[in-house]
Amino acid sequence: MRHFAEQFENYVEINFEENERYQVIFDRNFDVRRILTALELEAGKRILPGKTLLFLDEIQTCPRAITALRYFYEELPELHVIAAGSLLEILLNGKRRKDKLNFPVGRVRSMFLYPLSFSEFLRGTGNEMLCDYLNRGNEKPPSTHERLLEIFKSFLVIGGMPEAVSAFMGTGSILECQKVHRDIVMNFMDDFQKYDSPVPPDVLKRVFDFAVYHVCSQVKSSSAVEGISAYIFNESVDMLHRAGLIHPVKASSCDVIPLGSASKETNKKIASV
């Protein structure tokens, strides 16, 4: 966001998690002018429509700010606003929320950031020429093929999380990458406590922990995690999938397209995203 903001005259970053006073600003009403004035005073920076990029970070901690995006769009369309947050799907699908969250359908363009693909990994690790050659699709000389296989094996261990790739590039240590992986997994699991999801946080943790240690293993919902019914397990998998943390691959007995027409809900493999 900060790199993208270089094309604007000024940039204002609001982090709802670091400063809870920002959340209070949205409690009163959705008067856009009032909100902008309050944000300016709290941030100490001017917010000028047409000239400012306003970045609302960790917006999942302030649900009313999500609703306010509609009013920014309708009443002040010349203001450039970007919002970002983690595990938003868990928040948006909470069934026990006291206050209904009104998501601004049709007023927000959603974009999703995924881990690096293998091509992006090649470019990120200084192998641009190999990446270009790989994407040509022609037959590779044995030496090039072996080199790509070697890097791909490293990619399977390092993964595509930018921080883990950065740690590897800086230290060359797989152990440092594993530390990053553990931190990311633990941070996600800790975040489950913050959301009012239809599945209890401790159950989400158990299912997510199961998914981490059973990547690409065949799973039967009824017997995957002891003490968790097939229905709750599938609800948890669906929630984690929509949050972008795992990707279930369902078994199918279909031999024609679409394969999903004969997919089995209770028999699947789970892949980490």
Image (tube, grey):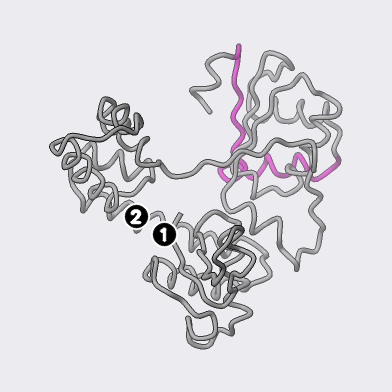
Q: Quick check: 221 left or right of 40?
A: left
Closer to the camera in the image, 6 or 109:
109
Above or below for 239 versus 163: below
Q: Residue furthest bottom?
A: 227
The vertical placement of 73 against 162, above or below, is: above
Residue at x 82% of width, y 24% of height = 76
Magenta part of the protein: which range? 8-29
> Residue at image x 49%, y 60%?
246
Specify whether 184 is left or right of 258. left
Image position of 172 (left or right of 70): left
SS at mark 1? helix
User: Is there a contact, CB below 8 Å, between mark 2 and mark 1?
Assistant: yes
Where residue 25 appears, x then y in whole percent? 75, 39
Q: Dot 2 surroundings within 10 Å: few (below 14), some, or many (20 or more)?
A: some
Q: Distance between the residues labelled 2 and 1?
A: 6 Å
Residue 269 lies in the magenta-colored region: no
Mark 2 element type: helix
Task: Residue 66: give x, y in percent of width and height.
Answer: 73, 43
| The image quarter in which residue 167 lies | top left
Residue bearing mark 2: 181
* Residue that lies at the very extreme toward the left in this rendered image: 143
Q: Is the residue 4 above or below the residue 260 in the image? A: above
Going 61% across and 65% down the picture, which residue do you hit? 238
Q: Which amino acid type is shown beneath numbered disc 1?
A: Val
Disc 1 designates what residue? 185
Q: Measured from the top left, where is residue 260 in percent x and y?
A: 61, 63
Mark 2: amino acid: His
Q: Is residue 15 magenta?
A: yes
Residue 117: percent from the left, percent from the top? 40, 41
| Residue found 68% across the figure and 28% down from its top | 81
Residue reaching furthest to the front: 256
